[in-house]
């Protein structure tokens, strides 16, 4: 079951990346890699490929019974990155861009990279992993990837780099010219707060489900012993 889920997830996530970057065309859109959406989905593709390889390895060595769930904290970091992607798209980009009649929200490519990919990675954790392995400090580390991207984007733009012709910021909430330094800082603070809240909620759910699983195992053990 784990291998089937991870293969399907890998195929869908990789399809989103291929479409986003126009990889199988004569003119791939490499500059799209300047955006966090592309980077987070590339990371998700690499991560899911790693899980597929690890699952095949364990199937070969140990047979069909058992689990493959390596590096739970890396899993949390990938989930955090993709949740950033989904939140920015659904909460910030879609409301701001739908004012343009030419803009079409939730196209196939947009849905793959902004919605389906995050849900698949979260689903992999929810369905296929032993709960109770996350730590309360993990969400602080998970935000390093998004924060590192913000630092890169601001430095790149300040040095004259353009994400689009004449545009030195990747997302509207990073537009210092329109929002001012204070406005951008408030947006980033709000984003960090939401992400940390999500991270701690994820840890709470993980630990809660882990506790329930442990109690259930203790209840079942005496029954098995009597049998």
Image (tube, grey):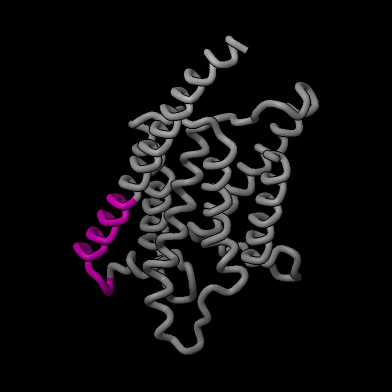
Is residue 186 located in the magenta-colored stretch of the structure?
yes
Is residue 57 located in the magenta-colored stretch of the structure?
no
Query: In the depicted view, which residue is nearer to us: 206 or 187?
Result: 206
Give the residue at the far left of this rendering. 182
Look at the magenta stretch and give its main secondary structure.
helix
Locate residue 13, reporting x and y percent: 64, 55
From what the image shows, is residue 188 above or below residue 148?
A: below
Left or right, 194 with respect to 116, comes to: left
From what the image shows, is residue 47 above or below residue 38?
A: above
Query: In the depicted view, which residue is nearer to us: 169 or 3?
Result: 3
* Residue at 36% in and 61% down: 158
Q: Which residues are magenta?
A: 177-194
* Residue at 43% in and 76% down: 166
Give the residue at the far front of this rendering. 227
Q: Image quadrant of residue 203?
A: top left
Query: In the depicted view, which residue is nearer to us: 90 or 35?
Result: 90
From what the image shows, is residue 145 above or below residue 133?
A: below
**Quarter of the image where the N terminus is located:** top right
Locate residue 127, reporting x and y percent: 57, 41
Locate residue 186, reporting x and y percent: 22, 60
* Residue at 75% in and 65% down: 24
**Quarter of the image where the C terminus is located:** top right
């Amino acid at each position: 079951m784990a291998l089937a889920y991870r293969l399907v997830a890998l195929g869908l996530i990789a399809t989103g990346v291929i479409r986003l970057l126009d990889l199988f065309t004569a003119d791939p859109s490499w500059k799209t890699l300047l955006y966090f959406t592309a980077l987070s989905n590339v990371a998700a593709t690499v991560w899911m490929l790693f899980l597929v390889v690890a699952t095949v390895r364990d199937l070969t060595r140990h047979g069909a019974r058992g689990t493959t769930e390596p590096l739970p904290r890396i899993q949390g970091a990938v989930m955090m990155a993709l949740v950033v992607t989904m939140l920015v798209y659904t909460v910030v980009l879609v409301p701001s861009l739908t004012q343009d009649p030419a803009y079409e929200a939730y196209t196939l490519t947009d849905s793959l990279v902004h919605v389906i990919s995050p849900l698949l990675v979260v689903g992999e954790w929810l369905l296929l992993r032993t709960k109770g392995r996350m730590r309360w400090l993990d969400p602080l580390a998970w935000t390093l990837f998004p924060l590192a991207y913000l630092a890169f984007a601001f430095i790149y733009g300040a040095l004259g780099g353009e994400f689009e012709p004449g545009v030195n910021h990747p997302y509207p909430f990073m537009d210092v010219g329109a929002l001012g330094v204070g406005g951008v800082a408030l947006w980033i603070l709000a984003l960090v707060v939401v992400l940390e809240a999500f991270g701690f909620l994820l840890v709470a759910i993980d630990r809660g489900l882990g506790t329930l699983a442990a109690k259930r195992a203790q209840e079942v053990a005496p029954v098995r012993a009597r049998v």
